[in-house]
Image (tube, rainbow, N blue to C red):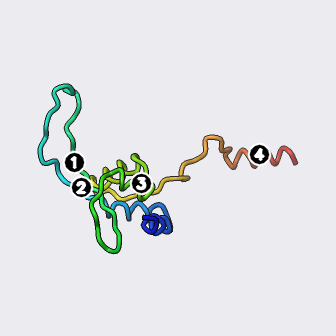
Amino acid sequence: MLEIFTNFHNLQSKTEQDIYLQSLIQIDPVDRNRPKESATTSKPKAFSVRYHILFNGIQTRVCKTAFMETYGCTTKQCYRLSHLLQLNETLTDNRGKGTSANAIPGSIIAKMRAHIE
């Protein structure tokens, strides 16, 4: 298991890691909807997810917990990857792309420097 974990974390970027994890997730339609009597307001399940682990070129089906513990990912990551896979959307890494709330615009900084000088 340590070999699987280290090979996964030796990938260059988070996008490559997400693509690798998505290749091990399989989306299937729901076989049978079983309505719950107590939850009348909940919506039915949209799809089923199967998780696999790749070891020595062989994909082995595992539970979600084993998948998350092997690759060190969280429930939110699995949720995001499975939903993007179901929607056929591409993965984007948006970390660090937003503007800082504390950032001072360059024009104001230039005015401050001119005032100090």
Vertical arrangement, residue 30 with respect to residue 42, above or below = below
Q: Earlier in the sequence, mark 2 or mark 1?
A: 2
Q: Earlier in the sequence, mark 3 or mark 4?
A: 3
Q: At which x and y percent is residue 42?
A: 23, 31
Marks 2 and 4, the one that precedes in the sequence: 2
Asked if the residues shown at circle 3 and circle 4 are in contact, with their CB atoms under 8 angstroms apart, the answer is no
**Residue at figure coordinates x 69%, y 49% from the top left:** 106
Question: What is the CA distance from the residue labelled 3 to the residue labelled 4?
Answer: 52 Å
Q: Amino acid at mark 2?
A: Ile
Percent of width and height locating residue 108: 72, 44
Q: How far is mark 2 from mark 1, CA to CA?
A: 7 Å
Near mark 4 (Cα within 10 A), the count class, few <14, some 14-19 or many ≥20, is: few
Is 75 positioned to the left or the right of 51 in the image?
Answer: right
Q: Residues within 10 Å of mark 1 (few under 14, many from 20)?
A: few
Q: Secondary structure at mark 4?
A: helix
Q: Which residue is mark 1?
A: 47
Between label 2 and label 4, give the one nearer the viewer: 2
Q: Nearer the viewer, mark 3 or mark 4?
A: 3
Q: Tag 2: Cα neighbours inside 10 Å, few (<14), some, or many (≥20)?
A: some
The residue indicated by pointer 2 is 27
Label 3: which residue? 69
Q: Amino acid at mark 3?
A: Glu
Which label was assigned to residue 111?
4
Residue 16 sits in which quadrant?
A: bottom left
Local SS, label 1: loop
Q: SS at mark 3?
A: helix
**43 vs 115: above or below:** above
Q: CA distance from mark 2 to mark 4?
A: 56 Å
Q: Secondary structure at mark 2?
A: strand
Q: Earlier in the sequence, mark 3 or mark 2?
A: 2
Residue 79: x and y, percent? 35, 48
